[in-house]
Every structure is written in structure tokens, then in C-alpha cells.
Image (tube, rainbow, N blue to C red):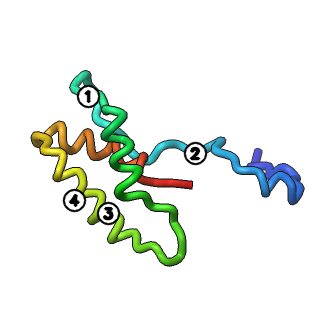
Amino acid sequence: MGYENPIRTLGDYSRSSHEGYRNTIELPEGNNVVPLRSDTIRLVQNRCSFHGLWFEDPNQHLKDFLKLVDSLDLDGENREITCLRLFQFSLRD
């Protein structure tokens, strides 16, 4: 039995769908997760948002994001976990 492709209309393609997609950022397992503060999330959203527009440089976005995370003064293991958790808030639209 092969994969069947259902017939879709143009209207079907115009609606966004997250079905079948999974988060590509995989957090380490365990109970060592530091809670994110709402002001930290807002800081990331306000200071280094990336919209994926043609004129935006994704490499510069990563540099700006990492510079911002460095300013949070986190220790080693918590820094990496917090960085992974915060990155999704820097992506917009």
C-alpha cells in the first residue's frame, strides 16, 4: 500500500497548518529546567526578533540572539538550556 495524496483545493493551501510538524529544538531530559521569566521573554522578543523577511540576515540574528543571552549572565548548563528555550521566542510571524 503506497502513500496516498489527498486532493486539495487552493483554499486548502492558503490555510496554515502545523499538522505533521514537530519542534526541531529538542531539550535535554530531566528536571533541571530553570523557569523562564516573562520579562526575559519580552526582552528577547523586543531586542532580537527575526521575521524571515528577505532583507533580514539570519546569521546576524543568531549573533544578536547569542549576544543577548550572554548578557543574562547564566552559568554553563543553564545557559544552553535557557538558550534553546528562548530561541523560539525570537522567531516571529
Q: In the picture provided, is 11 more to the left or to the right than 67?
A: right
Image x and y of residue 71, in percent: 17, 51
Between residue 29 and residue 47, name the one nearer to us. Answer: 47
**Residue drawn where x is 24% and y is 54% of the image:** 68
Disc 4 marks which amino acid? Lys
Disc 3 marks which amino acid? Leu
Disc 1 marks which amino acid? Val
Q: Which of the two discs, 1 and 4, labels the residue nearer the N terminus?
A: 1
Query: CA–CA distance between discs 1 and 4?
Result: 21 Å
- The residue to which callout 2 is attached is 21
Q: Which of the two discs, 4 and 2, labels the residue nearer the N terminus?
A: 2
How many neighbours does mark 1 have within 10 angstroms: few (below 14), some (14-19), or many (20 or more)?
some
Disc 2 marks which amino acid? Tyr
How many neighbours does mark 4 have within 10 angstroms: few (below 14), some (14-19), or many (20 or more)?
few
Q: Which mark is residue 54?
A: none
Query: CA–CA distance between discs 1 and 3?
Result: 22 Å
Between circles 4 and 2, the one closer to the viewer is 4
Image x and y of residue 90, in percent: 41, 52
How many neighbours does mark 3 have within 10 angstroms: few (below 14), some (14-19), or many (20 or more)?
some
Q: Are marks 1 and 4 in contact (CB under 8 Å)?
A: no
Q: In the picture provided, is 82 more to the left or to the right than 6?
A: left
Identify the element where label 1 is drawn: loop
Q: Which of the two discs, 1 and 3, labels the residue nearer the N terminus?
A: 1
Q: Which mark is residue 62?
A: 3
- The residue to which callout 4 is attached is 67
How many neighbours does mark 2 have within 10 angstroms: few (below 14), some (14-19), or many (20 or more)?
few
- The residue to which callout 1 is attached is 33
Between residue 23 and residue 55, name the one nearer to us. Answer: 55
